[in-house]
Every structure is written in structure tokens, then in C-alpha cells.
Image (cartoon, grey):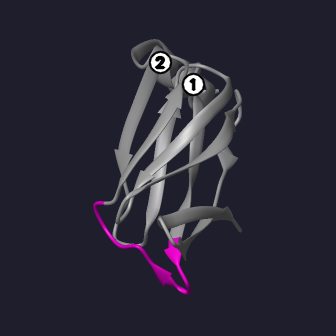
């Protein structure tokens, strides 16, 4: 009962987190993490949700809209990939593959 009260209290204090889609995952170049501070952005229509990777190349974004979005990574040039935001958390792990024009995101 105490846990339910705490959860309800958190939802009331932070209502945007209760109704957002969490998009998270990792970015790697080969077998190595891309490291800390790589800009990541999820774009859903006109809304932009920026984040940065941590020391392990992990990112975590809370998008208020659900549906089709674009994940944009600025790592030695921009790369983008279609992702989907849902009411439940969704994981997208990517490998950055070097191509003639920079890097491309390949889902792992």
C-alpha cells in the first residue's frame, strides 16, 4: 500500500513522465562505445527531445508524443534512423557504420 501511495505521489508531482514514451539504447562504433557526450535527439513532428550519451554510449530520451519519430545522432557528422515511441519503454541499440559520407546507423 505504501508503494502504491508513493507511485501515485510521483505521478502527481511529475505528470509528464507518466505519459511519455521512453526511448533508450546504446551507440557503438564497432565493438567500442561512442563514449560520453555524443548528442542524440528524438524528433516527433515539431517536437524535439535532446539528450547526450553517458560514458558507456547509452542514451535515454523521454518523448511526450507517441508514434513515428526520427532519432538523430551527431557523431562525426549526422546520422538518422526512424524509431517509434510508445507508452511503454522501447530500446534501440545502434552500431555506427562508416560509409563514404560519414556514418550510418545500423540497428543491432
Residue at the farthest left position: 37
**In whole angstroms, how far apart are the C-alphas of marks 2 and 1?**
6 Å
Q: Which residue is mark 1?
A: 20
Question: Which residue sits at x=48%, y=84%?
Answer: 32
Compared to 88, does 23 lie above or below? below
Foreground: 46 or 26? 46
Can residue 72 be seen at all in this image of the molecule?
yes
Task: Residue 31 in the image: state x and y as whole percent.
Answer: 55, 87
Q: Is residue 36 magenta?
A: yes
Instruction: Give me the disc on residue 108.
Output: none
Residue 49 forms part of the magenta stretch: no
Q: Residue furthest bottom?
A: 31
Badge 2 vs badge 1, beta-carbon distance below 8 Å: yes
Crowding at mark 1 (Cα within 10 Å: few <14, some 14-19, many 20+): some
In the image, 49: left or right of 85?
Answer: left
**Residue appearing at x 47%, y 12% in the figure:** 12
How many neighbours does mark 2 have within 10 angstroms: few (below 14), some (14-19), or many (20 or more)? few
The residue carrying mark 2 is 16
Q: Name the quadrant of the N terminus.
A: top right
Q: Secondary structure at mark 2?
A: helix
Q: Which residues are magenta?
A: 28-37
Amino acid at each position: 500500500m505504501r508503494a502504491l501511495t508513493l507511485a501515485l505521489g510521483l505521478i502527481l508531482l511529475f505528470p509528464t513522465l507518466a505519459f511519455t514514451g521512453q526511448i533508450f539504447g546504446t551507440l557503438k562504433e564497432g565493438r567500442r562505445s561512442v563514449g560520453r557526450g555524443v548528442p542524440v535527439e528524438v524528433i516527433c513532428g515539431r517536437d524535439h527531445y535532446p539528450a547526450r550519451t553517458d560514458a558507456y554510449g547509452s542514451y535515454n530520451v523521454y518523448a511526450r508524443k507517441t508514434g513515428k519519430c526520427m532519432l538523430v545522432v551527431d557523431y562525426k557528422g549526422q546520422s538518422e534512423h526512424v524509431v517509434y515511441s510508445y507508452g511503454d519503454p522501447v530500446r534501440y541499440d545502434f552500431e555506427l557504420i562508416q560509409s563514404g559520407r560519414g556514418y550510418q546507423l545500423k540497428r543491432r
